[in-house]
Amino acid sequence: MHIYKADILKHDLPGRQFCLEASTQPGAPLTAAQAKEAEAIDLLKTKAMLRAQKKCKHLYMGTVSFSEAVDLPRKRIQFWTTAIRRRKGCKVSVNLWKRQKKKAKVDVPTRDMTDEDLEAQLRLARRDYHTAKKEHEQHRDTFLDSLDKKVWDRL
């Protein structure tokens, strides 16, 4: 989002779009210059989106469509994997630990858990992910339907 916003502001697209909208008459067709300006704005926005998509972090999920129903079990798998690594003595940043625990919505204190309990939680998270993955297209449709109009327009 940061890269997209920087590109948009670099070309002053909001200002250009505002001037274009102010120069048009309701119900009247666009002049050739106005149409050319609208096409230029659209082209720059598209290029900015493509550049931002290229530079952003990618989730390698195979052919699974993104939705919150699929994302939460995936985050839980990441957290429980990190918890097991931490228990085995690998270095895990405290901030990473807090961030992953918050995103996975895990409220269980892990300090008192045994290694077998951690492994059981990881298996449970994987099972939840696989069941959510089977209906990923349906979850994606409901996810897109639940978005606000403001967010939907931005997509």
Image (tube, rainbow, N blue to C red):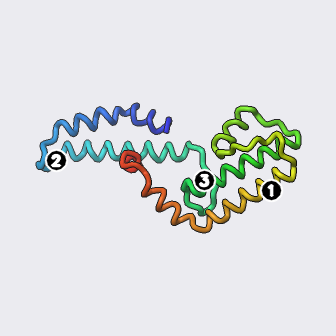
Q: Which residue is mark 2?
A: 30
Q: Please say if 1 is above or below 139.
A: above
**Mark 1–mark 2 distance (CA, rounded to whole Å):** 64 Å
Q: Read off the residue under disc 1.
A: 120
Tell me where residue 85 appears, x and y as whole percent.
83, 44
Dot 1: within a 10 Å radius of its alpha carbon, few (fewer than 14), some, or many (20 or more) residues? few
Secondary element at image label 1: helix
Instruction: Give the alpha-carbon distance from disc 3 to disc 2, as whole Å.
Output: 44 Å
Q: Nearer the viewer, residue 88 or 6?
A: 88
Give the CA separation, mark 1 to mark 3. 20 Å
Q: Nearer the viewer, mark 1 or mark 3?
A: 1
Amino acid at the residue labelled 3: Asp
**Residue at x 12%, y 49% (from the top left corner):** 27
SS for tag 2?
loop
Going from N to C along the chain, the mark reached first, 1 or 3, is 3
Residue 25 spot, x, y in % from top left: 12, 43
Circle 2: residue type: Leu
Q: Residue at x 63, y 43 (%)?
A: 103
Question: Residue 71 shows which numbered tag?
Answer: 3
Q: Residue at x 57, y 57 (%)?
A: 69
74 left or right of 52 in image: right
Q: Residues within 10 Å of mark 3 (few under 14, many from 20)?
A: some
Marks 1 and 3 close (CB-CB < 8 Å): no
Closer to the camera, 5 or 150? Answer: 150
User: Which quadrant of the figure has residue 45?
Assistant: top left
First in sequence: mark 3 vs mark 2: 2
Type of residue at label 1? Ala
